Image (cartoon, helix red, strand yellow):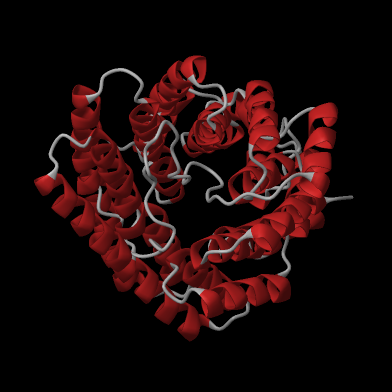
Amino acid sequence: MRQIATVIGLSVLMLTFGAIAGGVGRTGSDPAVSGGVVAPPAQVINGADATKAAAALQDRLRALPDDWSAWSSLGSLYTVQARLTADPSYYGKADGAFATSLRLRPDDNTGAITGQATLAASRHAFGEALQLTQSVDTKDPYAAGNLGIMVDALVELGRYPEAFTALQRMVDLKPGVASYSRVSYSYELRGDNAGAKFALERALAVAQSPGDIAFAQQYLGELAFNSGDLATAEQHFAAGLERNPSYVPLLAGRARVEAAQGRTGEAITDWQEVTSRLPQPIYLIEYADLLTSVNRTQEAAAQLALIEASAKLFRAQGANVDLELSLFDADNGRAPRALSAAQAQIDQRNSVHVEDAYAWALHASGRDAEALPHAVAADRLGMKNALFAYHRGMIEKSLDRDAEAKVSLEKSLAINPYFSPVQAPLAKAALAELQKKAP
Protein backbone atom coordinates (compact mmCIF):
# COMPACT_ATOMS: atom_id res chain seq x y z
CA MET A 1 0.00 0.00 0.00
CA ARG A 2 2.76 2.45 -0.73
CA GLN A 3 2.06 5.05 -3.38
CA ILE A 4 4.02 7.45 -5.56
CA ALA A 5 5.08 10.69 -3.92
CA THR A 6 2.13 12.78 -5.04
CA VAL A 7 -0.43 10.41 -3.61
CA ILE A 8 1.48 9.94 -0.35
CA GLY A 9 1.67 13.70 -0.07
CA LEU A 10 -2.08 13.94 -0.44
CA SER A 11 -2.49 11.20 2.16
CA VAL A 12 -0.40 13.19 4.62
CA LEU A 13 -2.62 16.21 4.02
CA MET A 14 -5.66 14.06 4.67
CA LEU A 15 -4.10 12.66 7.81
CA THR A 16 -3.36 16.16 9.04
CA PHE A 17 -6.51 17.98 8.08
CA GLY A 18 -9.08 15.32 7.26
CA ALA A 19 -12.32 14.73 9.09
CA ILE A 20 -12.34 12.03 11.75
CA ALA A 21 -14.29 8.83 11.38
CA GLY A 22 -14.22 5.44 13.06
CA GLY A 23 -13.16 2.10 11.65
CA VAL A 24 -10.91 -0.87 12.07
CA GLY A 25 -8.45 -2.75 9.95
CA ARG A 26 -4.99 -2.60 8.42
CA THR A 27 -4.65 -5.52 6.06
CA GLY A 28 -7.98 -7.09 5.47
CA SER A 29 -9.53 -7.09 8.93
CA ASP A 30 -12.04 -4.33 8.32
CA PRO A 31 -15.48 -5.89 8.85
CA ALA A 32 -17.44 -2.75 8.06
CA VAL A 33 -19.66 -3.04 5.01
CA SER A 34 -21.92 -0.63 3.21
CA GLY A 35 -25.20 -1.02 1.40
CA GLY A 36 -27.45 -0.94 4.43
CA VAL A 37 -25.87 -3.90 6.22
CA VAL A 38 -24.93 -3.44 9.85
CA ALA A 39 -21.35 -4.44 10.64
CA PRO A 40 -20.52 -6.51 13.73
CA PRO A 41 -20.85 -4.27 16.78
CA ALA A 42 -17.77 -2.33 17.88
CA GLN A 43 -17.72 -4.14 21.23
CA VAL A 44 -16.85 -7.42 19.49
CA ILE A 45 -13.21 -7.62 20.54
CA ASN A 46 -12.83 -11.28 21.54
CA GLY A 47 -14.32 -14.69 20.91
CA ALA A 48 -16.79 -14.47 23.79
CA ASP A 49 -18.16 -11.16 22.54
CA ALA A 50 -18.48 -12.57 19.04
CA THR A 51 -20.37 -15.60 20.32
CA LYS A 52 -22.85 -13.37 22.14
CA ALA A 53 -23.33 -11.15 19.11
CA ALA A 54 -23.84 -14.18 16.86
CA ALA A 55 -26.43 -15.60 19.26
CA ALA A 56 -28.35 -12.31 19.17
CA LEU A 57 -28.37 -12.32 15.36
CA GLN A 58 -29.41 -15.96 15.25
CA ASP A 59 -32.32 -15.17 17.57
CA ARG A 60 -33.38 -12.37 15.24
CA LEU A 61 -33.20 -14.63 12.21
CA ARG A 62 -35.32 -17.28 13.87
CA ALA A 63 -37.99 -14.63 14.24
CA LEU A 64 -37.32 -12.94 10.90
CA PRO A 65 -35.77 -15.53 8.58
CA ASP A 66 -36.11 -13.27 5.51
CA ASP A 67 -34.03 -10.45 6.99
CA TRP A 68 -31.33 -10.30 4.28
CA SER A 69 -29.44 -7.58 6.14
CA ALA A 70 -29.18 -9.69 9.30
CA TRP A 71 -27.93 -12.66 7.27
CA SER A 72 -25.18 -10.48 5.80
CA SER A 73 -24.27 -9.15 9.23
CA LEU A 74 -24.11 -12.71 10.52
CA GLY A 75 -21.75 -13.61 7.68
CA SER A 76 -19.49 -10.71 8.59
CA LEU A 77 -19.58 -11.75 12.23
CA TYR A 78 -18.64 -15.34 11.36
CA THR A 79 -15.66 -13.96 9.42
CA VAL A 80 -14.63 -11.99 12.50
CA GLN A 81 -15.06 -15.10 14.66
CA ALA A 82 -12.71 -17.03 12.39
CA ARG A 83 -10.07 -14.35 12.92
CA LEU A 84 -10.60 -14.08 16.68
CA THR A 85 -10.61 -17.83 17.34
CA ALA A 86 -8.42 -19.27 14.52
CA ASP A 87 -11.31 -21.68 13.91
CA PRO A 88 -11.65 -21.94 10.11
CA SER A 89 -14.99 -23.72 10.36
CA TYR A 90 -16.52 -20.24 10.61
CA TYR A 91 -15.54 -19.64 6.99
CA GLY A 92 -18.09 -22.17 5.80
CA LYS A 93 -20.74 -20.64 8.04
CA ALA A 94 -19.95 -17.20 6.64
CA ASP A 95 -20.25 -18.56 3.10
CA GLY A 96 -23.73 -19.86 3.86
CA ALA A 97 -24.88 -16.64 5.53
CA PHE A 98 -23.75 -14.43 2.64
CA ALA A 99 -25.30 -16.81 0.10
CA THR A 100 -28.61 -16.68 1.97
CA SER A 101 -28.52 -12.89 2.07
CA LEU A 102 -27.92 -12.70 -1.67
CA ARG A 103 -30.64 -15.27 -2.38
CA LEU A 104 -33.12 -13.18 -0.40
CA ARG A 105 -31.93 -9.94 -2.00
CA PRO A 106 -29.96 -10.57 -5.17
CA ASP A 107 -29.96 -6.90 -6.19
CA ASP A 108 -28.85 -3.81 -4.25
CA ASN A 109 -27.00 -5.94 -1.71
CA THR A 110 -23.45 -4.71 -2.08
CA GLY A 111 -22.80 -5.22 1.62
CA ALA A 112 -23.10 -8.99 1.25
CA ILE A 113 -20.72 -8.93 -1.72
CA THR A 114 -18.19 -6.89 0.23
CA GLY A 115 -18.62 -9.44 3.01
CA GLN A 116 -17.79 -12.19 0.53
CA ALA A 117 -14.73 -10.22 -0.53
CA THR A 118 -13.62 -9.90 3.09
CA LEU A 119 -14.08 -13.63 3.53
CA ALA A 120 -12.07 -14.34 0.37
CA ALA A 121 -9.25 -12.10 1.60
CA SER A 122 -9.31 -13.88 4.97
CA ARG A 123 -8.81 -17.14 3.08
CA HIS A 124 -5.98 -15.50 1.08
CA ALA A 125 -7.99 -15.82 -2.14
CA PHE A 126 -6.92 -12.32 -3.14
CA GLY A 127 -7.83 -12.57 -6.82
CA GLU A 128 -11.40 -13.47 -5.89
CA ALA A 129 -11.50 -10.71 -3.28
CA LEU A 130 -10.41 -8.17 -5.87
CA GLN A 131 -13.04 -9.24 -8.38
CA LEU A 132 -15.78 -9.00 -5.77
CA THR A 133 -14.71 -5.54 -4.58
CA GLN A 134 -14.49 -4.32 -8.16
CA SER A 135 -18.05 -5.48 -8.78
CA VAL A 136 -19.22 -3.48 -5.76
CA ASP A 137 -17.16 -0.46 -6.78
CA THR A 138 -19.00 -0.18 -10.08
CA LYS A 139 -22.29 0.06 -8.16
CA ASP A 140 -21.18 2.03 -5.11
CA PRO A 141 -17.88 3.89 -5.60
CA TYR A 142 -18.34 5.62 -2.26
CA ALA A 143 -18.17 2.46 -0.14
CA ALA A 144 -14.99 3.08 1.87
CA GLY A 145 -15.07 -0.34 3.56
CA ASN A 146 -15.18 -2.04 0.18
CA LEU A 147 -12.23 0.05 -0.98
CA GLY A 148 -10.26 -1.11 2.06
CA ILE A 149 -10.62 -4.74 1.04
CA MET A 150 -9.76 -3.79 -2.54
CA VAL A 151 -6.56 -2.12 -1.32
CA ASP A 152 -5.62 -5.19 0.71
CA ALA A 153 -6.20 -7.52 -2.25
CA LEU A 154 -4.19 -5.35 -4.65
CA VAL A 155 -1.30 -5.14 -2.18
CA GLU A 156 -1.22 -8.90 -1.69
CA LEU A 157 -1.31 -9.39 -5.44
CA GLY A 158 1.69 -7.09 -5.81
CA ARG A 159 -0.27 -4.52 -7.84
CA TYR A 160 1.03 -1.60 -5.81
CA PRO A 161 0.28 1.43 -8.02
CA GLU A 162 -3.38 0.37 -8.28
CA ALA A 163 -3.48 -0.26 -4.54
CA PHE A 164 -2.17 3.21 -3.74
CA THR A 165 -4.71 4.83 -6.05
CA ALA A 166 -7.55 2.94 -4.34
CA LEU A 167 -6.09 3.83 -0.96
CA GLN A 168 -6.13 7.53 -1.78
CA ARG A 169 -9.81 7.23 -2.68
CA MET A 170 -10.46 5.50 0.66
CA VAL A 171 -8.65 8.23 2.63
CA ASP A 172 -10.56 10.91 0.75
CA LEU A 173 -13.88 9.21 1.45
CA LYS A 174 -13.39 8.20 5.07
CA PRO A 175 -10.30 9.22 7.01
CA GLY A 176 -10.15 7.13 10.16
CA VAL A 177 -8.54 4.11 11.76
CA ALA A 178 -9.17 1.81 8.80
CA SER A 179 -7.71 4.16 6.20
CA TYR A 180 -4.93 5.61 8.36
CA SER A 181 -3.63 2.15 9.25
CA ARG A 182 -3.51 1.22 5.57
CA VAL A 183 -1.69 4.46 4.80
CA SER A 184 0.79 3.47 7.50
CA TYR A 185 1.45 0.15 5.82
CA SER A 186 1.88 1.94 2.50
CA TYR A 187 4.72 3.94 4.04
CA GLU A 188 6.23 0.88 5.67
CA LEU A 189 6.26 -1.02 2.39
CA ARG A 190 8.42 1.68 0.83
CA GLY A 191 10.81 1.97 3.74
CA ASP A 192 9.48 5.16 5.30
CA ASN A 193 9.00 4.00 8.87
CA ALA A 194 8.70 7.56 10.15
CA GLY A 195 5.73 8.09 7.85
CA ALA A 196 4.28 4.75 8.92
CA LYS A 197 4.56 5.74 12.56
CA PHE A 198 2.96 9.13 11.89
CA ALA A 199 -0.04 7.51 10.22
CA LEU A 200 -0.50 4.98 13.03
CA GLU A 201 -0.32 7.74 15.60
CA ARG A 202 -3.16 9.48 13.75
CA ALA A 203 -5.09 6.21 13.83
CA LEU A 204 -4.53 5.93 17.57
CA ALA A 205 -5.59 9.56 18.07
CA VAL A 206 -9.01 8.94 16.51
CA ALA A 207 -9.53 5.43 17.89
CA GLN A 208 -12.37 5.19 20.38
CA SER A 209 -13.24 1.54 20.94
CA PRO A 210 -10.95 -0.77 22.95
CA GLY A 211 -10.52 -2.90 19.83
CA ASP A 212 -9.37 0.02 17.68
CA ILE A 213 -7.01 1.29 20.39
CA ALA A 214 -5.50 -2.17 20.86
CA PHE A 215 -5.15 -2.53 17.11
CA ALA A 216 -3.26 0.77 16.72
CA GLN A 217 -1.02 0.05 19.71
CA GLN A 218 -0.25 -3.40 18.32
CA TYR A 219 0.97 -2.07 15.00
CA LEU A 220 2.91 0.76 16.61
CA GLY A 221 4.60 -1.93 18.69
CA GLU A 222 5.24 -4.12 15.65
CA LEU A 223 6.70 -1.17 13.76
CA ALA A 224 9.07 -0.43 16.64
CA PHE A 225 10.05 -4.09 17.05
CA ASN A 226 10.72 -4.49 13.34
CA SER A 227 13.07 -1.50 13.63
CA GLY A 228 14.94 -3.09 16.55
CA ASP A 229 13.50 -0.66 19.14
CA LEU A 230 12.57 -3.05 21.93
CA ALA A 231 11.82 -0.41 24.57
CA THR A 232 9.29 1.43 22.43
CA ALA A 233 7.73 -1.81 21.25
CA GLU A 234 7.33 -2.98 24.84
CA GLN A 235 5.64 0.31 25.78
CA HIS A 236 3.08 0.03 22.98
CA PHE A 237 2.26 -3.60 23.69
CA ALA A 238 1.84 -2.84 27.40
CA ALA A 239 -0.37 0.18 26.69
CA GLY A 240 -2.54 -1.88 24.38
CA LEU A 241 -2.89 -4.74 26.83
CA GLU A 242 -3.87 -2.30 29.55
CA ARG A 243 -6.81 -1.15 27.43
CA ASN A 244 -7.69 -4.55 25.98
CA PRO A 245 -6.15 -7.52 27.88
CA SER A 246 -7.96 -10.04 25.64
CA TYR A 247 -6.28 -8.92 22.40
CA VAL A 248 -4.00 -11.84 21.54
CA PRO A 249 -1.77 -10.09 18.92
CA LEU A 250 -0.57 -7.73 21.67
CA LEU A 251 0.41 -10.69 23.81
CA ALA A 252 2.29 -12.17 20.86
CA GLY A 253 4.11 -8.87 20.44
CA ARG A 254 5.09 -8.87 24.09
CA ALA A 255 6.38 -12.44 23.74
CA ARG A 256 8.63 -11.39 20.84
CA VAL A 257 10.07 -8.55 22.89
CA GLU A 258 10.67 -10.82 25.89
CA ALA A 259 12.49 -13.33 23.72
CA ALA A 260 14.65 -10.60 22.20
CA GLN A 261 15.50 -9.29 25.68
CA GLY A 262 16.62 -12.74 26.80
CA ARG A 263 13.61 -13.21 29.08
CA THR A 264 13.06 -16.66 27.63
CA GLY A 265 10.91 -18.09 30.40
CA GLU A 266 8.45 -15.21 30.22
CA ALA A 267 8.42 -15.40 26.42
CA ILE A 268 7.63 -19.11 26.46
CA THR A 269 4.84 -18.56 28.99
CA ASP A 270 3.30 -15.86 26.80
CA TRP A 271 3.66 -17.93 23.63
CA GLN A 272 1.95 -20.85 25.37
CA GLU A 273 -1.02 -18.61 26.11
CA VAL A 274 -1.02 -17.10 22.61
CA THR A 275 -1.04 -20.47 20.87
CA SER A 276 -3.64 -21.94 23.19
CA ARG A 277 -5.99 -19.00 22.63
CA LEU A 278 -5.29 -18.40 18.93
CA PRO A 279 -3.58 -21.40 17.29
CA GLN A 280 -2.89 -19.77 13.94
CA PRO A 281 -0.07 -21.32 11.88
CA ILE A 282 2.01 -18.13 12.05
CA TYR A 283 1.94 -18.06 15.87
CA LEU A 284 2.65 -21.78 16.14
CA ILE A 285 5.64 -21.31 13.83
CA GLU A 286 7.03 -18.44 15.90
CA TYR A 287 6.64 -20.41 19.10
CA ALA A 288 8.33 -23.44 17.55
CA ASP A 289 11.23 -21.23 16.43
CA LEU A 290 11.72 -19.90 19.94
CA LEU A 291 11.70 -23.42 21.40
CA THR A 292 14.20 -24.55 18.76
CA SER A 293 16.49 -21.63 19.57
CA VAL A 294 16.77 -22.73 23.21
CA ASN A 295 17.19 -26.44 22.36
CA ARG A 296 13.78 -27.52 23.64
CA THR A 297 13.53 -29.84 20.68
CA GLN A 298 10.78 -32.16 21.93
CA GLU A 299 8.46 -29.25 22.61
CA ALA A 300 9.35 -27.73 19.24
CA ALA A 301 8.49 -31.04 17.57
CA ALA A 302 5.10 -30.99 19.30
CA GLN A 303 4.46 -27.54 17.85
CA LEU A 304 5.41 -28.87 14.42
CA ALA A 305 2.65 -31.45 14.69
CA LEU A 306 0.20 -28.72 15.67
CA ILE A 307 1.31 -26.59 12.71
CA GLU A 308 0.57 -29.47 10.35
CA ALA A 309 -2.83 -30.09 11.92
CA SER A 310 -3.74 -26.41 11.89
CA ALA A 311 -2.74 -26.05 8.24
CA LYS A 312 -4.93 -29.03 7.31
CA LEU A 313 -7.91 -27.48 9.07
CA PHE A 314 -7.46 -24.17 7.28
CA ARG A 315 -7.04 -25.83 3.90
CA ALA A 316 -10.15 -27.93 4.48
CA GLN A 317 -12.12 -24.70 4.79
CA GLY A 318 -10.68 -23.18 1.63
CA ALA A 319 -7.96 -21.09 3.27
CA ASN A 320 -4.49 -20.77 1.75
CA VAL A 321 -1.52 -20.83 4.13
CA ASP A 322 1.13 -21.69 1.53
CA LEU A 323 3.17 -18.53 2.02
CA GLU A 324 3.61 -18.98 5.78
CA LEU A 325 4.37 -22.68 5.46
CA SER A 326 6.80 -22.21 2.57
CA LEU A 327 9.18 -20.15 4.71
CA PHE A 328 8.83 -22.57 7.63
CA ASP A 329 9.45 -25.61 5.47
CA ALA A 330 12.47 -24.00 3.81
CA ASP A 331 13.95 -23.33 7.25
CA ASN A 332 13.31 -26.88 8.45
CA GLY A 333 14.73 -29.11 5.76
CA ARG A 334 11.63 -29.59 3.64
CA ALA A 335 12.82 -27.82 0.50
CA PRO A 336 10.64 -29.67 -2.05
CA ARG A 337 7.45 -28.84 -0.17
CA ALA A 338 8.59 -25.27 0.42
CA LEU A 339 9.29 -24.78 -3.27
CA SER A 340 5.98 -26.30 -4.34
CA ALA A 341 4.05 -23.96 -2.04
CA ALA A 342 6.04 -20.88 -3.04
CA GLN A 343 5.74 -21.73 -6.73
CA ALA A 344 1.96 -21.94 -6.36
CA GLN A 345 1.97 -18.44 -4.90
CA ILE A 346 4.37 -16.82 -7.38
CA ASP A 347 2.20 -18.13 -10.21
CA GLN A 348 -0.72 -16.13 -8.80
CA ARG A 349 0.83 -12.99 -7.32
CA ASN A 350 4.16 -11.23 -7.07
CA SER A 351 4.03 -9.21 -3.90
CA VAL A 352 7.35 -8.51 -2.22
CA HIS A 353 6.58 -11.13 0.43
CA VAL A 354 5.88 -13.78 -2.19
CA GLU A 355 9.08 -12.88 -4.06
CA ASP A 356 11.03 -13.30 -0.83
CA ALA A 357 9.42 -16.65 0.00
CA TYR A 358 10.05 -17.96 -3.50
CA ALA A 359 13.67 -16.83 -3.39
CA TRP A 360 14.19 -18.58 -0.06
CA ALA A 361 12.57 -21.80 -1.25
CA LEU A 362 14.83 -21.79 -4.32
CA HIS A 363 17.84 -21.21 -2.05
CA ALA A 364 16.81 -24.15 0.16
CA SER A 365 16.63 -26.22 -3.02
CA GLY A 366 20.18 -25.27 -4.01
CA ARG A 367 19.05 -23.05 -6.88
CA ASP A 368 20.69 -19.82 -5.79
CA ALA A 369 21.28 -18.37 -9.25
CA GLU A 370 17.53 -18.53 -9.86
CA ALA A 371 16.80 -17.28 -6.34
CA LEU A 372 18.78 -14.04 -6.49
CA PRO A 373 16.57 -12.13 -8.97
CA HIS A 374 13.57 -12.87 -6.77
CA ALA A 375 15.41 -11.73 -3.64
CA VAL A 376 16.24 -8.50 -5.48
CA ALA A 377 12.59 -8.17 -6.54
CA ALA A 378 11.53 -8.51 -2.90
CA ASP A 379 13.46 -5.31 -2.22
CA ARG A 380 11.94 -3.36 -5.11
CA LEU A 381 9.87 -1.05 -2.91
CA GLY A 382 12.67 -0.37 -0.43
CA MET A 383 10.94 -1.95 2.56
CA LYS A 384 13.16 -2.12 5.64
CA ASN A 385 12.68 -5.80 6.29
CA ALA A 386 15.43 -7.62 8.17
CA LEU A 387 14.28 -11.06 6.99
CA PHE A 388 14.33 -10.01 3.33
CA ALA A 389 17.88 -8.67 3.69
CA TYR A 390 19.01 -11.82 5.53
CA HIS A 391 17.60 -14.07 2.82
CA ARG A 392 19.26 -12.03 0.11
CA GLY A 393 22.57 -12.03 1.96
CA MET A 394 22.59 -15.79 2.41
CA ILE A 395 21.75 -16.31 -1.26
CA GLU A 396 24.58 -13.97 -2.28
CA LYS A 397 26.95 -15.76 0.09
CA SER A 398 26.07 -19.10 -1.50
CA LEU A 399 26.96 -17.59 -4.88
CA ASP A 400 30.34 -16.42 -3.53
CA ARG A 401 29.30 -12.81 -3.96
CA ASP A 402 30.90 -12.03 -0.64
CA ALA A 403 30.99 -8.24 -0.82
CA GLU A 404 27.29 -8.04 -1.67
CA ALA A 405 26.43 -10.66 0.93
CA LYS A 406 28.25 -8.68 3.59
CA VAL A 407 26.27 -5.55 2.73
CA SER A 408 22.97 -7.44 2.84
CA LEU A 409 23.68 -9.17 6.14
CA GLU A 410 24.89 -5.94 7.74
CA LYS A 411 21.69 -4.31 6.52
CA SER A 412 19.57 -7.09 8.02
CA LEU A 413 21.13 -6.79 11.46
CA ALA A 414 21.09 -2.99 11.34
CA ILE A 415 17.36 -3.01 10.65
CA ASN A 416 16.53 -5.42 13.46
CA PRO A 417 19.11 -7.64 15.16
CA TYR A 418 16.27 -9.54 16.88
CA PHE A 419 14.25 -10.41 13.76
CA SER A 420 14.22 -14.15 14.51
CA PRO A 421 15.44 -16.26 17.42
CA VAL A 422 16.72 -18.82 14.91
CA GLN A 423 17.73 -16.81 11.85
CA ALA A 424 19.28 -13.74 13.52
CA PRO A 425 22.10 -15.79 15.12
CA LEU A 426 22.72 -17.44 11.75
CA ALA A 427 22.96 -14.01 10.14
CA LYS A 428 25.53 -12.93 12.72
CA ALA A 429 27.57 -16.10 12.22
CA ALA A 430 27.51 -15.74 8.44
CA LEU A 431 28.56 -12.10 8.67
CA ALA A 432 31.43 -12.97 11.02
CA GLU A 433 32.62 -15.60 8.56
CA LEU A 434 32.57 -13.06 5.72
CA GLN A 435 34.41 -10.52 7.80
CA LYS A 436 37.18 -13.04 8.50
CA LYS A 437 37.52 -13.72 4.78
CA ALA A 438 37.69 -10.04 3.87
CA PRO A 439 41.20 -8.81 2.93
Q: Residue at x 49, y 73 (%)?
A: 244
| Residue extending furthest toward the right | 439
From the viewer's perspective, is 377 left or right of 265? right
Horizontal side of residue 304 vs 183, given as left or right: left
Q: Position of residue 385 (x, y in %)?
A: 68, 48
Examine the rendering and report whether any part of residue 32 can be seen: yes
- Tell me: residue 345, above or below residue 282: above
Total labels: the figure holds 0
Relative to the observer, which residue lies in front, 214 or 366?
Answer: 214
Q: Quadrant of the N terminus?
A: top right
In the picture, measured across the screen, residue 99 lies left or right of residue 405, that is left
The image quadrant of residue 206 is bottom right
Between 101 and 5, the one lying in front of the other is 101
Residue 98, how many percent across, how many down?
25, 33
Residue 317 visible in the shown view: no
Please state the horizontal and vertical placement of residue 23, each as a whole percent of the image: 55, 50
* Residue drawn where x is 53% and y is 34% of the image: 152
In the rendered image, residue 119, in percent from the top left (x then y), is placed at: 35, 37
Identify which residue, 203 or 258, lies in the foreground: 203
Is 243 situated left or right of 194 in this image?
Answer: left
Identify the residue shown where x is 79% and y is 57%.
Answer: 436
Furthest-front residue in this view: 63
